[in-house]
Amino acid sequence: MSPPGATAPQPPPPSPRPASPPAQATASGALPELAAVFWRPRVSDRSLRRTGRLWTLFTVGQTAPFVLGAAVLAWLRPVLAPVSVILLVHAWAIPELYAARGAGVVRRARHRDHPAEPVALGLLGDLIDHYARELHSRTRLVLERGRLGIWLVGEAGALLIRPGGRRVHCYCVRVPDPQLPPSDRTAHLLLALRTDETGFATVANLAFSGARWRLRRRLPSDRREALDAAGRARAG
Amino acid sequence: MSRLVRMDQTGHTTVAEWTAEDPVSVEAAVGAFRAQLDRGYYAVVSRGEGCAEQVRELPLDAQLVILRRPIAGG
């Protein structure tokens, strides 16, 4: 595979987005699905930053004891070095498993050969611009700029690349209708996202929040291309 | 010609078509729109790049109104 950016067209510069709407306008345009998760506070830029920090703290809290234990064992009894290695492998595996769970939200569709997929693809194509259409044809993910960051919308989940490009939030969200073709699923999520971005992030279940590089390693090559494109779009 | 489209297992289905100058087609479209909302669909109108609006009344000036199912956390 050629390096990202070598063959892929450069994304257009970010279009100017209006400032955040006043609270009243947001409330009137709220996703009706929010009623099903009434106990969740609405996601905001601030809450996403806090969530990111909590994820990092939580991960450190889980891995640090293994690293500490490995160091103590190796210091006390060098003969126990193999045990220390096992502990270090555990410490390495924990965040990797979380990242794998995050990557799972943009997994491949199980019904790629749905007979209605070409029709659904046509409708989805009408909703997005040329660049996003081209990227979707290769990666099956739709790149969408939002106020919270750059989104990559798939059939059963979405990735949010936060401003700065270092942290990604992985959301599991879907249309509970098994009959829909894959592109219709993506279109459903895309329209909900465009209607109410913070509401969309509130309704969706957070599967992972962490470093982009860590998530990237767990993604299939085509999805990596989309993640790289999102990084370039952020930079652009 | 404006269209009311429902995303479903066929990809999408055109539920109604209307022109603002034709009251008969408008009436039929409004009836079909309400029937779809009663079935649990949400209606969305694209409002330019990256923006969409959920509507509860059929916007007669819109070129395309899309009906979608509710989403949920996975």
Image: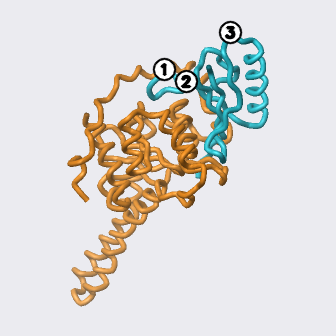
Chain colours: A orange, B cyan
Whether labels 1 and 2 belong to a single chain: the reply is yes
- Which three-letter amino acid code belongs to the residue tagged 1? Pro
- Name the amino acid, label 3: Glu
Residue type marked 2? Thr
The label on residue A30 is none
Q: Which mark is residue A21?
A: 1
Residue with the mark numbered 3: B21
Circle 1 marks a residue in which chain?
Answer: A
Q: Is residue A73 left or right of residue A113?
A: left
Residue tagged 2: A26
**Residue B35 in picture, x, y percent from top left:** 79, 30
State the CA–CA distance, disc 3 to disc 1: 34 Å
Of tags 3 and 1, the one toward the viewer is 3
Residue B45, above or below A84 = above
Q: Element type at marker 2?
A: helix
Q: Earlier in the sequence, mark 1 or mark 2?
A: 1
Q: Are marks 2 and 3 in contact (CB under 8 Å)?
A: no
Foreground label between 2 and 3 = 3
Q: Nearer the viewer, residue A227 or A185?
A: A185
